[in-house]
Structure formats: C-alpha cells, structure tokens
Image (tube, helix red, strand yellow):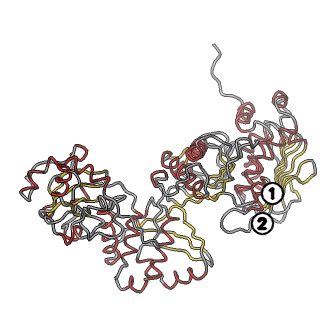
Amino acid sequence: MPSIKVLPKQLANQIAAGEVVERPASVVKELLENAVDAKGTHILCEIKNAGKQLIRIRDNGIGIVRDELPLALAPHATSKISTVEDLNAIVTLGFRGEALASIASVSKLTLSSKTKEQEHGYCVRVEGPEQNPVVEPFAHPEGTTVDVAELFFNTPARRRFLKSDRTEFLRIKDIFTRVALAHPDIGFELISDSKSVVRVSPSKVENGIDLRRTATLLGADFSSGGISVICEDPAIQIEGMMLEPPKETDAVSEQIYLFLNGRPIADKLVTHALKEAFFEVLGKTLPIRCVLYFSVDPSEVDVNVHPRKDEVRFHNSSLIHDLIVDNIVLALRKYGIGPDNQLNDVSAVSHVSSFDIDSKDLPAFPKGVSSFNRSDSLVLKNSNFLNSDSVINNNTSDNVKNYSDYLDKVIQSSAFYQDSVKSSSLANKNFVSESFSQLKTEYADNLAVLDSVADDTLLVRYRGKFFLLNINNLKRKKLSLEFSRSVISSELKTVKLTLPFTLVTDEIFVKALKTAENAVKKCGFVLKLYKTKVEIIQIPEMMKGCQLAEYAAKALKLICASFKSIEDDQIPVQLSDLMALTDSSLIDVNSVLESVDSFETSSKDPEVMAELNFEKIIRIQRYGNEK
C-alpha cells in the first residue's frame, strides 16, 4: 500500500488551480472581483483568442505596495480578512487569498501595480508552479494590472477540454456582464482581439436601476422600466426589475441576474423562490427575465460554501425564501399579471399589508360584518338587550360590515347557552371550544370566554351581556395605547437597522423632517437627511419585521403634520394606530386578554366588541327568521 506523504508545493498549487481555474472565464471572474475590491472607478478587461492567449485586467484602484507584490502571489495570502471572525461577515468579493497563486501555477503571469504614495510602479513575473518572483521597476499608472498569458501552457490536457473560441468568449462576456451589473458605480470596458465589445460608464442614477446602462449590458428588452420590485424588510432589501412574462409561443430564453451585497450569485434558494412566485401568479412555468439586487446583513449569510462563491447559505433561509416569494407575487399582481389578479387578497400575499392611512376603510372588527338580513335587523338599538328584534348592537361604526358568517356558528352553538340566557346569566361552566381549551374562562372585570366563533373572534359574556370580541383588534388597540404611553414617558424601545432603508422623496418633505426633528426622534426614528432622499437608521422596535416601504413614509408624514402636539406629549391616535398595525408578532390570546385591566372601554369600541342579542339568536334557531 502506498505511503501517505505531503504533496509537493507545485503539485498542490495545480490541484488548487483545478478548483479555482476551470476555464478562461474563471480567471476573468477572479481578477474582476479583485479589481472591484481595489476600489477603482474604471476596470478594463482585455482578452485575446477568447482568453486562451491573453487575459488582462486593469483597474485604477489603490494598488499594491512594492514589498507586497511577491506576497500577493503566495497561496492563502490576502488583505481582506485576518481572523476567523472575519469569515462570519464577509463584505469583499474575494477573501480566500488563493486566486492569484492558482492562476499563476497554470499560466505566465505578470502583476504590476503602483500606489498613490509611490513615485513609480513595480511588477513581478512568474511562470507555472515554480514561483520565484523578483520585483522590478515598471512604468505603470496608479492602480493594478494583471496579465495572464498562455493559460494552461503547462497542462495541455486542460487546454483540450476548452470549448470553441466563440463559446469561451460568450462565457467571459456573461461573467463580465454580471460583475458590471453588480457594481453600477464602476465603469467597465471589455476588449476582445483589440476591438471594444462593451463599454459602460459609472451610473449617475442615485436610486433605482440605470435603465440605459442595463440595456447596454443586457439588450434593448431591458431599456424600459418593466415590473418594479421593491422590498424594505429588516431581514432583506430587494430592488430591481422584471420583464413581463412572455407568451407561451414566444421563443425567449431565461435571463436571471441576481446580486447579493454586490456579489453575482446563482443561488438555488433564490431561484426556487422566483419560480414559485411566478407559478403562483401564472399557474404555469414560463422563462423569467429579471435583474434583482438583494441586500442582507453580511453576518446573516455565508458566502464561503462553494469554490466559485456563487452559491450562498442564508442563516434564516425559510424567511428569506418567503419574503422573496411574497414580494415577487405582489409586484406581478400590482402590474396586472395573472389570470386572477386579486391584489387585495391579503391571504395570497401574507407579508404585505394594503393599509392606507389616507383611507377611511380601516381594518374593521370581523371581516365582512353587516345586518343578518335587511327585513329583520339583528341590531340592538340603544343597547336594549331584551326588547329588540336585533342581535348586534347598532352603535357600531360604518366600518363594521357583515356578521352573517359568524352568526351561523353562534346559532349552532346556542344550545349550550339556552338555559343560561333565560335566567339572564350564565352558569360558571367551561364552554370554551376544544381549539381554545388552553384559555381561562374568567378574566379581568368579570369577562367570561364562552366559545371561539372564528380564528380571531371569541364569544364572551361581559356584565350580563354577550359580545363578539375580536382578538386582533383588541391587540391593536392595546399596542396603540402602549406606543402613546412609551413616547410620552420616553421609554419607547428602538432597534437599529442593519442596513439603512432609503426613502426617495422631495425637498419639501426633507425640510418638514428637519423642522420636526425632535418629534421624529421622540417617536423612535433616527434619520439621515439628503436633498431628495431620507435614510432611516433606527426604527421603533414594534416595526421590526414589517414592510417599511408600506409604513415608514406614512408614519413620518403623520409625525411632521403633528410634531408640535407630539413635542407636547399629545400623540395623534392615527399615528399610534398605524404603529400598532406594524407589529407582526404572533398573537397569544391568553396574554392579550390578561393584559387588559378593564373591558369597559373595549365594550364601547365597535371595532373590538360587538354586542349580541342572544334571545334573538335562539328564537331564529327555534322558529326561523319571522317578523
């Protein structure tokens, strides 16, 4: 049996090169990423014979100092990370320190560079795995140039596996395009066999996608706005565009360009989320064409899971997947895509709220509440419990609409309560349904839970009368009150965003925010103001996980409109109600009910509790709906 031994350095480098350097496009990718990390404003990529003869990448970045040029070619030598902790939050494209060493082991490589502090440039030249770099003076502008000549000159078997020049060129162009799209703030140029193929300048568009630049890189189809995608969730920010789904008869190829924190990716989870969203809306699979930019806290994603670094692992993959699906579905439906375009179907887009502070149709008590029928109203007039032909109290607002869906369940359950109703009080028995068996029967202020009528609605007895109690709205009212009290007492809990959330606005709104600066801070927001945009740095803790794009601007506008009142500890109800709506935490029914000291106010709030005429319900059950 052969003995175990340490491989020679040259052989180890060539094995490593096999992982990093598959073809000329692999070299272009690694060198372009190094150029981007060098913080240049213009990057030139020049190739000859599809990269087989020459690959040259030049940038005008910070450069490499003379003494570090040989070290740059050494395996696992890098300036981008230094500790194990750095791997947990990688912010550069490169970080392993093996690209140059691997490329140099299978090519004739020249590395030349000049820093701002040096009077002139220097270079090192190496050929193959036996690297003995010698630093030489070299005329060079500020920045770095890497020349890779005769790729695989010392491994002819690898050269035989390369495809035709056209195929290898198209792969290089695809890599170049993705890197150029990922960094719109940098100018890029691709030259092939002394001919300029693509040239784009740094984008001057401050917000959104530079359509002209994108069309230059991807083609005329991307020259129009397409379907805009925006998500401002603390877990992930998404910005980009999609083209309309093609017709089934169109011969269109898929074009998916994804970028995470400035890194081109081809991640299976993100791609699956895209396809799932399109299938949910269209009901069929069609080619997807999109350019999407994702921003995630670097500590929440691991990019060190694949040699090519184009696959990543999200720490909270299920949340990221669902957020992508929901926001793509929302974008498609807003654009009118899909056979059943139901934008207002909240269940279809669970993470997105359609609440509008300018609308009078605030979320009402139960969904769809109105009279039982027009000829025989089920409303108790003047709270006259026994002398009425109605079931639901008439002092409800216009927002309380149709209760009929719930009445059927109440009527079915009424046999449990008939004897108690006749005596105007209920025996102290546990009538709680099995699904709510964990609830107590008695709470503060003698409120008794009798049954569950729906997922968010309970049948309760309070002071000898019967009510439907909406848990969602009770929680919202509670949170609204807590927000007001926290602002007044300066005890509002806040959270700092991992990445600032940007609002594009106008100079008038920015000026209003400056005027209301004290009120804005008092309400938990920390902002950075620009001429026509606002960066949100900190938000109230209760907004964590909500759709900032949906709520942030509305909250800030309310604050600006009432900043003097807020400074005087008079919090507008509309603002506190809006903030309560942003809370996305799960509801613990017991904790919500136990947190209420008295239900006196709630019983008079038609959005929380609606009074029932139980005598009427029982009569309907026994004799039908007779006048």
Percent position of residue 83, x then y = 56, 50
Q: Position of residue 283 (x, y in %)?
A: 58, 42
Which of discs 1 and 2 lies nearer the camera? The answer is: 1
Q: Which mark is residue 134?
A: none
Between the C-alphas of marks 1 and 2, the distance is 32 Å
Q: Amino acid at mark 1?
A: Thr
Indicate the secondary structure of the residue bearing disc 2: loop
Q: Residue furthest right?
A: 194
In the rendered image, the residue lying farthest to the front is 627
Identify the residue at horizontal 92%, vertical 47% (top origin): 193
Q: Is residue 365 visible?
A: yes
User: Which residue in the protein does label 1 denote?
Assistant: 216
Q: Which residue is mark 2?
A: 116
Which one is in front, 88 or 440?
440
Residue density around tag 2, few if under 14, some if 14–19, many if 20 or more, within 10 Å: some
Q: Is residue 515 above or below residue 481?
A: below
